Amino acid sequence: MGEEAERYVVVTGANKGIGLEIVRQLAKEGITVVLTARDETRGKEALESLKSQELHNVNFHPLDVTSQESILALADWLRKTYGGIDILINNAGIILLGKDVTFETVKPVLDTNYFAVKNVTKTLLPLLRDDTPGGARVIVMASRLGQLKMLERKDYVKTLSDREHLTEDFVDSFANHYLKDVANGSQKEGGWPNWTDWVNFPFGRPVETYSVSKVAIIAYVSALHNILVAQPGSGKKINVFSCCPGYVATNLNNNKGQKTVEEGADTPVWLALHSPKEGSGKFWAERKVVDF
Ligand SMILES: NC(=O)c1ccc[n+]([C@@H]2O[C@H](COP(=O)([O-])OP(=O)(O)OC[C@H]3O[C@@H](n4cnc5c(N)ncnc54)[C@H](OP(=O)(O)O)[C@@H]3O)[C@@H](O)[C@H]2O)c1
């Protein structure tokens, strides 16, 4: 990052866990960070915790990623306050609440981890600056549970692994197909993940929906890269990355993860600082491109 120009980053779901740590590490680099959270009280408490560590280049703005009204309000505030941003980190994510895989429990997971990430990204894309050194960047927190080896449907594995030809419409149809099969109670017959306890064990609840949502968002990052590459006339340089933080002890897994949040924040922060152009559209972990 250039030392002279002020840089701005937005982090979603940043009141705790890996998101809060990403904010802390980027603020320590001297970047101005907008810490966002769906709950104003929790967000402001997180902000105060950073100020008590002498990190004063952090601002708070509410954001519920599943509300388009909330996304638009953030976009409007960013435009008025900073004019534009350099980095967007889509960190907010949830896992299935409870043990029943039904349309009602599955829908919020797909909405938060897939559809909302798309909505936030598309709405804030026009705010990404043209003149960020190395290109503006969008980073998405995915998971190794979203690797294609988790998917039993070979037809989808084939098409989704053809990264250079992935389209947003296709990824949408993948996510909607899963939702439809869950609604019909036919996800098992449909060949969707339906795992036994060895995968679900550490979480104490089913993770297959989370896995499908992360497959979708890793695929979308490739599709978005393809869209951006196909629009050279816009003059905008934007790199997009999906990444896995590793298995990190946070609320998401009842603090069963083996890594600390400091370790979990390492790859997304490194991508934010370095933005390796040749790695745009790809899935990263431990600062390296890994298999989707
Ligand atoms: N921990 C791991 O081992 C691991 C592994 C792979 C990937 N990840 C990914 O890393 C990211 C961060 O997870 P974490 O482990 O730090 O989990 P976490 O501690 O549970 O934090 C999740 C954050 O997302 C926020 N959030 C949820 N729904 C939201 C919404 N609708 N709008 C705005 N914010 C919302 C939560 O806010 P509230 O406090 O209001 O609920 C919280 O701040 C997630 O995308 C997760 O899938 C984590």
Image (cartoon, helix red, strand yellow):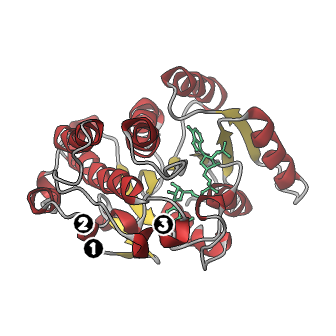
- Sequence-wise, which precedes: disc 2 or disc 1? 2
Q: Please say whether residue 162 is visible from this viewpoint.
A: yes
Q: Label 2 amino acid?
A: Leu
| Quadrant of res 40 | top right
| Mark 3, other Cα within 10 Å: few <14 / some 14–19 / many ≥20 | some
- How many marks the image carries: the answer is 3
Give the residue number, with chain letter if any, for mark 1: 291
Give the residue number, with chain letter if any, for mark 3: 274
Q: Is residue 185 left or right of residue 119?
A: left
Q: Residue 272's x, y, as percent?
A: 51, 60
| Quadrant of res 70 | top right
Q: Label 3 amino acid?
A: His
Q: Is residue 190 left or right of residue 40?
A: left
Q: Is mark 3 within 8 Å of ligand 1?
A: no
User: Dots 2 and 3: beta carbons under 8 Å?
Assistant: no
| Mark 1, other Cα within 10 Å: few <14 / some 14–19 / many ≥20 | few
**Quarter placement of the C terminus:** bottom left
Task: Say which of marks 2 and 1 sits in front.
Answer: 2
